[in-house]
Amino acid sequence: MIRFLYIAFVMFGILSCQPNKQEAIDRLKSLPDNEGGQIIRKAIERAGGWENWVSKDNLSYYKQITHLDSSGAVESTEKQFHIYELKNGFKGQIAWNIGNDSLQIINDGMHAKKYKNGIELTDDKSKDDAWDTSFGSHYVISMPFKLTDAGVSLTYEGIDTLILDRPVHSVKVEYDKGAGSTGGMHLWWYLFDVDTYDLVGNYLDHGKGYTINIYEGFQEVDGLRIHKKRNRYISNEKKELVMLRTIYEYEEMKFDVAVNESIFKLR
């Protein structure tokens, strides 16, 4: 079964829950004492601070996804509602509509399933989509905090002037083989503003192609600074923007809302 679709952010899905207090202290301390580790520390502080992040119980938001064709015309749009439990082991639910059909992904922390009009989809593509989308979406929205996960190797590569329209700090991110779902398979370069240390983009070599994500705008939610919009481009080995493929927009983000645990129960 192929475990990599369009996301590849699922690296550390099985480690997605918030750490307890001691684990939180240890994870931040475990960042390497090199330039890469220092950049991530500054990025975490800029994003609202480690203690603020690990104190959160859950996270919910709406995510609008716009798919574009090769000419730049809109192929399709969908608006999803995401909710993730963070504190007591990772769990998640995603719900959206396509035409007259209602779709849902539920992840109970151990297994993930996709449903259409309340009926489980059992084909391999739907099974992979349930796993990748639930873990992957949480992984993306949890940056730069997720760069403290076990198995992450950080290498500062200096100021990059090729990928974006301005110079940025470039940190190469590798994942140890066996870490998460795709450890050892992909290479990332995370890009940070040279002055503020905002996470402004990344470049991904996933072995079968290249992707550039560019973040636009930020929103402050309960003292945390989270991006509002992400543009996903197809790229090449020269780190050039080839084609804008998908636009992600994040709205109504909330932490620590009242949640009925039954919404994370698989059917």
Image (cartoon, grey):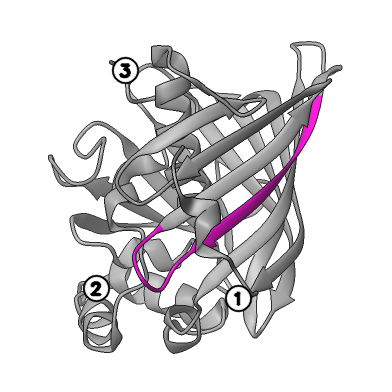
Looking at the image, tell me whether mark 3 or mark 1 is earlier in sequence order: 3
Q: Nearer the viewer, mark 3 or mark 1?
A: 3
Looking at the image, tell me whether mark 1 or mark 2 is earlier in sequence order: 2
Quadrant assignment for the N terminus: top left
Left or right: 121 as drawn, with respect to 74: left
Image mark for residue 196: 1
In space, the residues marked 3 and 2 are separated at their CA atoms by: 31 Å
Place of residue 238 in the rendered image (x, y in percent of width and height, measured from the top left): 47, 26
| Mark 3 Cα shell of 10 Å, populated few (<14), some (14-19), many (≥20) | few
Place of residue 261 in the rendered image (x, y in percent of width and height, measured from the top left): 50, 63
Left or right: 2 as drawn, with respect to 103: left
Of 194 and 266, the residue lying toward us: 266
Image mark for residue 2: 3
Place of residue 233 in the rendered image (x, y in percent of width and height, measured from the top left): 63, 30
Place of residue 197 in the rendered image (x, y in percent of width and height, measured from the top left): 54, 72
Image mark for residue 103: none
Q: Which amino acid does the dot numbered 1 rest on? A: Thr
| Mark 2 Cα shell of 10 Å, populated few (<14), some (14-19), many (≥20) | many
Looking at the image, tell me whether mark 3 or mark 2 is earlier in sequence order: 3
Which quadrant would residue 20 be assigned to in this image?
Answer: bottom left
Residue 154 drawn in magenta: no
Q: For the stretch drawn in magenta, what is the main secondary structure?
A: strand
